[in-house]
Image (cartoon, grey):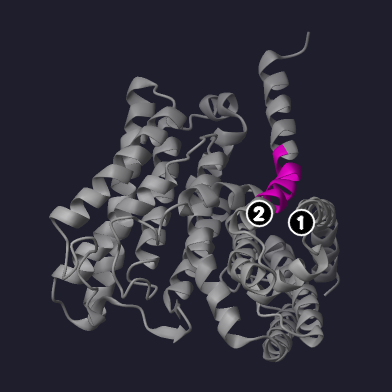
């Protein structure tokens, strides 16, 4: 038990600085947004109260419940983070050594605390508006996935901004399989999801090959491929996959849809959360993930250690493409938008890839951090309609406020990334 609580204490120490930086940056962003609203004659307090409705907060009790949920969530992540970080020392692995009573008691206490925290969180959720809460969660699904695309690339030292095009390709692939093929219910859903991820990964392979074989910078190639997908996908929708309406794909068959949980939220959220956890395990609990991160942190050391830099780059693009393809599928077979169709205007998927960049940076290029950043941004997106309906705040100003808050939250992470870049540059130059 002593080792376990030492692990928790150590985890809290490492979490203290980034948490404080993020809270301070959020306060700055809110103040700047308030200045924008004052400059255009709006009441910032009432504007932010309306924005909170996007998080399901309609009463003071709901606001206090969210604060309690945040505190409980922090406590939960602290226990889980410390548990995984110190498992070899604090808890005995059954296949490595004999389990002691002390280890069994440690496991029991941790499990009890985690279950109790989850129970308290579930009770706090009762104070929130269920419809808007589910709508916020629905908004967050593609955002946490496109955040993975950029985050994994950054971990490998790659500036992958191709999630936008990969989302388009994944969405149209899901619309094709989901609307034009008749398969058994479970198989149809699995095949549609898997094919969307496969097409997203295939589209991501193009800049990866150009980077590996010809040295083409990924920023140039991914931007160009984003535009190719932007014009190619509407052509496919209108000329190949159109249904009753020429400007939309055929309606997704019921066998290829994720079950609706409430509002526009479907069970695809569980797939998205599982994808974030899998990517986390891959990056921090496997040899391939360690090599990928080492390539991003210090390419020279990785090369000296015999690690294939090309392989790490290829893996990062494939993972990012699969996540982006899944994000596209989540808006066609995982959300009842436009009558379960994909419009030729791409309005249901437009911008998701670019939003993922900011969310990844706010989440410190971490798949779990991206979940919380996606929830924050999803709440702001969902709350935008209330700012317009309640107080007439123009949509352009609402988007500007959202952008200011995201930029403010991203600054600490950007500064940390720049400091790491300076350190790597000094290591490469060596002592003078």
**Is the C terminus in the top left, top right, bottom left or bottom right quadrant?**
top right
Q: Which residues are magenta?
A: 403-414
**Is the N terminus in the top left, top right, bottom left or bottom right quadrant?**
bottom right
204 or 343: nearer the viewer: 343
Locate residue 249, reporting x and y percent. 22, 64
Q: Secondary structure at mark 2?
A: helix
Q: Quadrant location of residue 98?
A: bottom right
What label sits on residue 37 in the rendered view? 1
Marks 1 & 2, CB-CB < 8 Å contact: yes
Which residue shows up at 40% across the image and 58% down it?
A: 349
422 or 66: nearer the viewer: 66
Whether 112 is drawn above or below 174: the answer is below
Which residue does the numbered mark 2 point to in the structure image?
Answer: 397
Which residue shows up at 84% across the image and 70% down it?
A: 5
First along the sequence among labels 1 and 2: 1
Q: Residues within 10 Å of mark 2 (few under 14, many from 20)?
A: some
Residue sitting farthest toward the top: 432
99 or 350: nearer the viewer: 350
Whether 112 is drawn above or below 34: the answer is below
Locate residue 236, reporting x and y percent. 19, 52
Which residue shows up at 28% across the image and 43% down it?
A: 231
Which residue shows up at 25% across the image and 82% down it?
A: 254
Rounded to the nearest whole Å, what is the CA distance between mark 1 and mark 2?
8 Å
């Amino acid at each position: 038990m002593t080792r376990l609580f030492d692990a928790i204490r150590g985890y809290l120490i490492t979490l203290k600085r980034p948490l404080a930086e993020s809270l301070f940056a959020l306060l700055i962003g809110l103040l700047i947004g308030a200045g924008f609203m004052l400059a255009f004659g709006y009441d910032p307090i009432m504007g932010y109260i309306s924005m909170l409705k996007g998080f399901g907060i309609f009463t003071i009790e709901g606001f206090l419940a969210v604060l309690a949920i945040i505190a409980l969530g922090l406590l939960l992540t602290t226990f889980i983070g410390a548990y995984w970080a110190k498992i070899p020392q604090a808890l005995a692995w059954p296949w490595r050594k004999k389990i002691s009573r002390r280890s069994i008691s440690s496991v029991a206490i941790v499990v009890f605390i985690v279950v109790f925290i989850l129970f308290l969180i579930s009770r706090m959720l009762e104070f929130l508006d269920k419809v808007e809460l589910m709508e916020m969660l629905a908004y967050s699904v593609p955002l946490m996935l496109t955040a993975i695309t950029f985050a994994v690339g950054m971990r490998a030292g790659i500036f992958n901004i191709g999630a936008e095009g990969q989302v388009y390709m994944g969405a149209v692939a899901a619309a094709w399989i989901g609307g034009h093929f008749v398969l058994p219910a479970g198989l149809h859903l699995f095949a549609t999801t898997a094919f969307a991820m496969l097409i997203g990964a295939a589209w991501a392979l193009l800049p990866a090959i150009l980077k590996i074989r010809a040295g083409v910078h990924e920023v140039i190639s991914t931007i160009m491929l984003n535009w190719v997908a932007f014009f190619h996908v509407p052509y496919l929708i209108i000329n190949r996959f159109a249904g009753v309406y020429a400007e939309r794909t055929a309606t997704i068959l019921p066998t290829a849809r994720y079950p609706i949980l409430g509002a526009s939220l479907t069970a695809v959220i569980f797939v998205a959360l599982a994808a974030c956890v899998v990517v986390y395990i891959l990056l921090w609990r496997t040899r391939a993930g360690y090599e990928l991160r080492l390539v991003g942190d210090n390419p020279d050391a990785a090369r000296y250690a015999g690690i294939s830099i090309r392989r790490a780059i290829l893996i990062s693009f494939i993972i990012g493409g699969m996540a982006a393809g899944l994000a596209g599928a989540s808006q066609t077979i995982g959300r009842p938008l436009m009558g379960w169709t994909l419009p030729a205007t791409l309005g249901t998927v437009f911008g998701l890839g670019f939003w993922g960049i900011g969310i990844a940076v706010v989440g410190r290029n971490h798949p779990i951090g991206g979940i919380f950043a996606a929830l924050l941004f999803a709440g702001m997106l969902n709350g935008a309609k209330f700012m317009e309906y309640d107080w007439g705040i123009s949509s352009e100003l609402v988007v500007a406020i959202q952008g200011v808050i995201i930029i403010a939250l991203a600054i600490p992470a950007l500064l940390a990334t720049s400091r790491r870049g300076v350190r790597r540059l000094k290591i490469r130059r060596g002592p003078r």
